[in-house]
Image: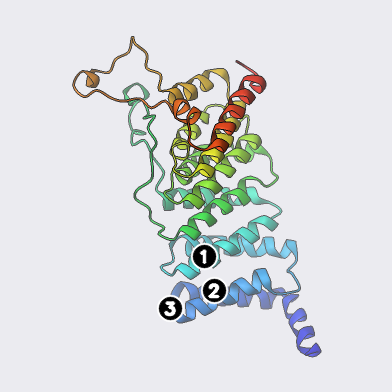
Amino acid sequence: MDSEKEKSILRRNDHQYVYKQINMDINIILEGDKQSKKESVERLYNFIVKDKPELNVVFLQEILISFNKQLIKIGLWDPLEKCRELSIKILIYLYSTSTNINIFFPFIFSALVDKLDCHDLEGDNALPEEMRNKPSQKPLRISKIQENCEDIRVLYVKLMETVILKEYHLDSINIFVQDIVNIVRTLCMDPCTAVILEACSLVTQMCKKFTQLLLHFNPIVARGLLNALAHKHSKVRIAALESLESCFLCSPFKKNVEIMESLIGFRDPNLVPIKDFYEPTVKINYFAQLVQDHSVLVRRKFFEFGSNIMINMSDR
């Protein structure tokens, strides 16, 4: 047993052997039959994540540079659920150990935007700004979902959390803020409760980290939280209020006004859409719903939210 253990340690320290094993398993996952794909992805997961001794951090970075694209392809698009799940877990582990995460931003965010189909959630990106409709203040939920497994969608949130909350210079992520906001907003509008809870937690942390980068995006993030504010589970409504508070505290006054108008269903009496003469529209006052919520914890959180933004908001 001792000789086998020593042999295993020596092999894991042999970079050429490790590369050969990883490359062989990835090729089987990409081209093999169902049974061999399952065996290979489990072997790959154990080899990179679970087996001891742990691989050197510098070596893990080299592995990530060499196999990042293949792992993303398997994790997002492989037909087998097991392959997608374990590949994303491998990516989360590799990204968490990465010493230079910003070189992978273009691959991660563009791939998730394609998978979640969130290039243009409003459907009006091709129109000039003056021709775009005013965004709806009703709670919206994503109905067309390409990933059917809820556990894997939770892993999407954990993957985003691992990547964007690491240490790096914020200038390196500046050009990807629009993609990040679209991804996070889509996850907040997911029909699965577990995904929404994780996404709300991510919004809270993201607002604290990207305070300067989100100045013009906070109303978009806040609209994504409307689904959670109207959710049937009280724990989701509480999580949404915590995320909303973070949005308010890192937004300038002008953007906070936009968020507040959406939340209280404000309608400017001097601006009446022509459509309203034929089809009267209904505005939702989320604050009126929350102040009389049947859950004591939600009502308490709402009053804490109100007092915190009135006391701590710098520009009010």
Q: Residue furthest left?
A: 278
The CA distance from mark 2 to mark 3 is 11 Å
- Helix, strand or loop under label 1: helix
130 or 198: which is nearer to us? 198
Would you name the residue on which mark 1 appears? Answer: 85
First along the sequence among labels 2 and 3: 3
Q: Indicate the amino acid at tag 2.
A: Val
Quadrant of the snapshot with the N terminus: bottom right
Would you name the residue on which mark 3 appears? Answer: 34
First along the sequence among labels 3 and 1: 3
Kindly identify the residue that appears in the image at 48 percent across and 77 percent down.
37
Position in image of residue 212 (x %, y %): 62, 29
264 or 248: which is nearer to us? 264
Q: Does the residue at mark 3 contact the one at mark 1 (Cβ under 8 Å)?
A: no
Position in image of residue 121 (x %, y %): 38, 39
Q: Is 266 positioned to the left or the right of 18 in the image?
A: left
- Above/below status of 113 relative to 279: below
Q: Indicate the amino acid at tag 3.
A: Lys
- Is residue 304 visible in the rendered structure shown here? yes
Would you name the residue on which mark 2 appears? Answer: 41
Within-10-Å neighbours for mark 1: few <14, some 14–19, many 20+: many
- Above/below status of 199 relative to 75: above
Q: Is 216 positioned to the left or the right of 167 in the image?
A: left
Q: Is 170 positioned to the left or the right of 234 in the image?
A: right
Q: Indicate the amino acid at tag 1.
A: Glu
- Helix, strand or loop under label 3: helix
Position in image of residue 232 (x %, y %): 44, 43
Q: Nearer the viewer, mark 3 or mark 1?
A: 1
Kindly identify the residue that appears in the image at 43 percent across and 62 percent down.
77
Which quadrant of the view contains residue 275?
top left
First along the sequence among labels 1 and 2: 2
The CA distance from mark 3 to mark 1 is 15 Å
